[in-house]
Each structure stands twice: as structure tokens, then as C-alpha cells.
């Protein structure tokens, strides 16, 4: 969903004392403050010094277009079709969705989040080893295969 998909982050860990191979962070990263929190945590963990990589997943819809956000930056904006697809997925999951619930207000909530999204800036992108744009209309399995291929 726009609030959850734009700037979702997958983080691949290299071998370390704990034997970690992968950490996947599935949460909202549409605001600079949210992304800054993640970047600070990766720095605190000395992520790169441990030989780990960070992959930024950027979900997009074929009907998304460029426009100015509330932050004044030109970036891809979530289209109505993007928001509608996300709303239909939340509704299909029902109570199984980890954050959102189907309701009469759902689409409005998603549209508000979509409008609030802030563009990714170069100073943020430099903290990631790669940025992978995924088509939000793909199935979860197709998206997962694209991530695996990128890693």
C-alpha cells in the first residue's frame, strides 16, 4: 500500500558472529524522517563495516506520474490506480493485514499517505547499495523473485 510500499527496505546481511543472512524490514518509509531512522540504525549496527548490503525497494504502478509533493520536490507520485490496487489488497486480506483494516475510510487514509510521501533524496540513496523498482501490480511471488535476482 502506498504508505507501506514506497521505500520499503530489504537489508541483506553478510556472515557475522550471529550467522545472520537476511533482515527484511517491511514498514512505512514514505517520509524522510522514517528513512533517516532506518539509516541511523544501519549506521549504529555498522552495517557496511560488517560486509552487509542494503537494497531499497521502490514500488511503482504503471500509471504513476511525476508531480510535486508537499515537500516541494518533483518525484513520482502515487496514482489513483496505485492507491485503488493497494486498497483492494488490504480489503482482500481483511483482518490479516498487519496495519490497515478494511473500512469506509481506507481509501482516504491511503490517499492521504500517498499525498504525504516525500521524494527520496540523493543523500538518502547513497546509504543503499542498490534501488530496485518493483511493479506493485506484480504478485508477491513475482516481486520476491525480482528481489532474489537482484541480491
Image: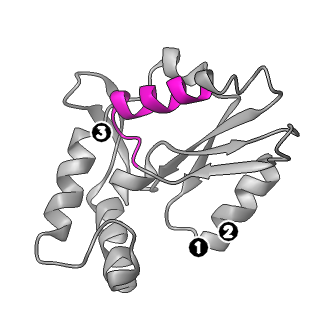
Residue 30 sits inside the magenta stretch: yes
Q: Position of residue 125 (x, y in %)?
A: 56, 24
Mark 2 crowd level (few <14, some 14–19, many ≥20, 10 Å Cα) = few
Q: Tell me the distance, in whole angstroms, between the alpha carbons under discs 1 and 3.
A: 23 Å
Residue beneath disc 2: 142
Q: Are marks 2 and 1 in contact (CB under 8 Å)?
A: yes
Q: Tell me the distance, in whole angstroms, between the alpha carbons under discs 2 and 3.
A: 25 Å
* Residue at 58% across, 53% down: 134
* Residue at 20% across, 55% down: 111
Residue beneath disc 3: 117
| Viewer-nearest residue: 40 or 63 | 40
Q: Provide the secondary structure element on which disc 1 rests.
A: loop
Q: Is residue 41 above or below residue 9?
A: above
Residue beneath disc 1: 139
Query: How has the structure been colored for display?
Result: one colour
Q: Are marks 1 and 3 in contact (CB under 8 Å)?
A: no
Q: Which residues are magenta?
A: 28-42
| Viewer-nearest residue: 29 or 57 | 29
**Numbered mark located on residue 96 in the image:** none
Amino acid at each position: 500500500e502506498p504508505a507501506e510500499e514506497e521505500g520499503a527496505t530489504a537489508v541483506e546481511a553478510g556472515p557475522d558472529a550471529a550467522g545472520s543472512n537476511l533482515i527484511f524490514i517491511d514498514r512505512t518509509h514514505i517520509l524522510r524522517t522514517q528513512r533517516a531512522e532506518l539509516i541511523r540504525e544501519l549506521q549504529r549496527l555498522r552495517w557496511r563495516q560488517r560486509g552487509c548490503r542494503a537494497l531499497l525497494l521502490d514500488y511503482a504502478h504503471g500509471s504513476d506520474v511525476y508531480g510535486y509533493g508537499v515537500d516541494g520536490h518533483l518525484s513520482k507520485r502515487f496514482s489513483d490506480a496505485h492507491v485503488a490496487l493497494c486498497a483492494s489488497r488490504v480489503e482482500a486480506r481483511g483482518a490479516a493485514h498487519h496495519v490497515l483494516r478494511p473500512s469506509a475510510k481506507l481509501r482516504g487514509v491511503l490517499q492521504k499517505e500517498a499525498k504525504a510521501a516525500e521524494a527520496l533524496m540523493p543523500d538518502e540513496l547513497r546509504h543503499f547499495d542498490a534501488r530496485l523498482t518493483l511493479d506493485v501490480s506484480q504478485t508477491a511471488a513475482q516481486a520476491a523473485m525480482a528481489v532474489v535476482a537482484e541480491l
